[in-house]
Image: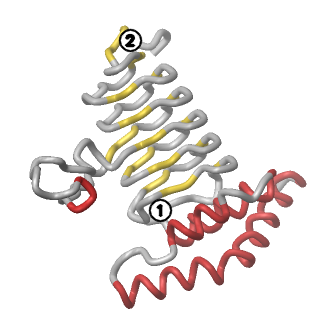
Amino acid sequence: MSVRGFFKSFLSVVSICIVAPLGLAERAARGIFHRDVWFRTHGEFLGLVPGKFGRYLRNAYFWITLQSCPLDCCFILGSTFTQSDTVVGHRVYIGSYSRVGLATIGDDTVLGDHVHLLSGKHQHSFEDPLLRIQDQPQIFTRIYVGRNCWLGTNTVVMENIGCNCVIGASSVVTHVIPDNVIAVGNPARVLGPRPNL
């Protein structure tokens, strides 16, 4: 193991030790209440820790609390998750102030700054005119983002994205995006295949 690899492993272990009380308390509370209890609060708090050490703390906490999250990910300042059933692949990078709902993110995928992966298209209903929107039923749907994708800054995702895709900045993904394409716009439309694939 290289010196750099050893140092990274050491920082991961230290980070796990620091966030373990938060992560284990959350997991114990879930066992009692059968739902997330402090998950969002802890994530938002850790999202405010600056610098490289903040990245290690966030990765360690989500390693403990998400359904799956390897220790080789990078979550920049302000990035957080809203659903603990999320699955994160290896070497995923999530940019600053990005928010991830119920999702599965493939290996080597990069989310730019201020990207929002929503929990589907129907998180909020407004069909019953007699109820406030806040009181209407919510439906959370898992969003799949394939491996080796790049989602540009300010992208909003409400549907699945295939592998090896590039989604242009400020795009809104409302329909399924197939593998190996570039898509842009609101709503996002496929421009064509990614070159050299």
- Residue pictured at 75% horizontal, 59% vertical: 49
- Give the residue type that dot 2 points to: Pro
**Position above or below: 154 against 34:** above
Graded by Cα atoms within 10 Å as few (under 14), some (14 to 19) or many (20 or more), the crowding at tag 1 reads: some
Q: In the visual, does 15 lie left or right of 103?
A: right
Q: In the visual, does 146 lie left or right of 48?
A: left
- Residue pictured at 33% horizontal, 14% vertical: 190
Give the number of the disc on residue 68: 1
- Name the spot of residue 158 as percent of width and height, x first: 32, 38
Give the distance between the C-alpha atoms of the residues marked 1 and 2, in whole angstroms. Answer: 31 Å
**For marks 1 and 2 on the same chain, the one whose residue lies earlier in the sequence:** 1
**Position above or below: 182 against 124:** above
Q: In the visual, does 158 lie left or right of 50?
A: left
- Give the residue type that dot 1 points to: Ser
List the single residue furthest toward the bottom.
32
List the single residue furthest toward the right.
3
The C terminus lies in which quarter of the figure?
top left
- Residue pictured at 42% horizontal, 43% vertical: 117
Quarter residue 193 falls in: top left
Give the number of the disc on residue 129: none
